[in-house]
Image (tube, rainbow, N blue to C red):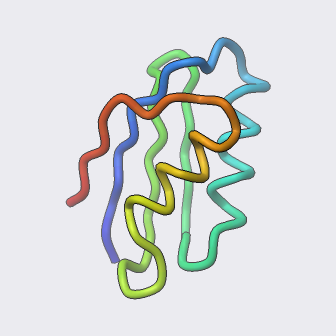
Amino acid sequence: MKNATLRIDGMHCAGCAAIVQALLERQAGVKAVEVSHREALARVLFEPQTISEQVLVSAVENAGYRVTSAEVS
């Protein structure tokens, strides 16, 4: 398992955070997601053999948000 922390521009309310969370939770290989619009962050626990960091970023950006940084540990 790996953790990804995505810094996201464009989340202005709890509804935006809920959209991002739902998008990420639907991705195969994602085990847990925590999103905060106040911190402009999404924290994702995922299986790197099933899904890549780039797929996570693309899922967020395809919804109209912008990922400004992504850190994986």
> x%, y% of residue 12?
65, 12
Between 51 and 18, the one nearer to me in the picture: 51
Q: Residue at x 62, y 77 (%)?
A: 28
Between 18 and 62, the one nearer to me in the picture: 62
> x%, y% of residue 45?
43, 64
* The N terminus, quarter of image: bottom left
Between 57 and 20, the one nearer to me in the picture: 57
Q: Residue furthest left?
A: 73
Residue 68 in which image quadrant: top left
Task: Indicate left or right for 22 with 2 as reference.
Answer: right
Task: Indicate left or right for 65 with 8 as reference.
Answer: right
Can you say whether 29 is above or below 35 in the image?
below
Q: Residue at x 30, y 35 (%)?
A: 69
Residue 24 in which image quadrant: bottom right
Q: How many marks?
A: 0
Q: Residue furthest bottom?
A: 49
Task: Indicate left or right for 43 with 37 as reference.
Answer: left
Residue 2 in which image quadrant: bottom left
> x%, y% of residue 67?
44, 34
* The C terminus, quarter of image: bottom left
Can you say whether 36 is above or below 33 in the image?
above
Q: Residue at x 72, y 65 (%)?
A: 26
Can you say whether 4 is above or below 1 in the image?
above
Q: Residue at x 56, y 54 (%)?
A: 33
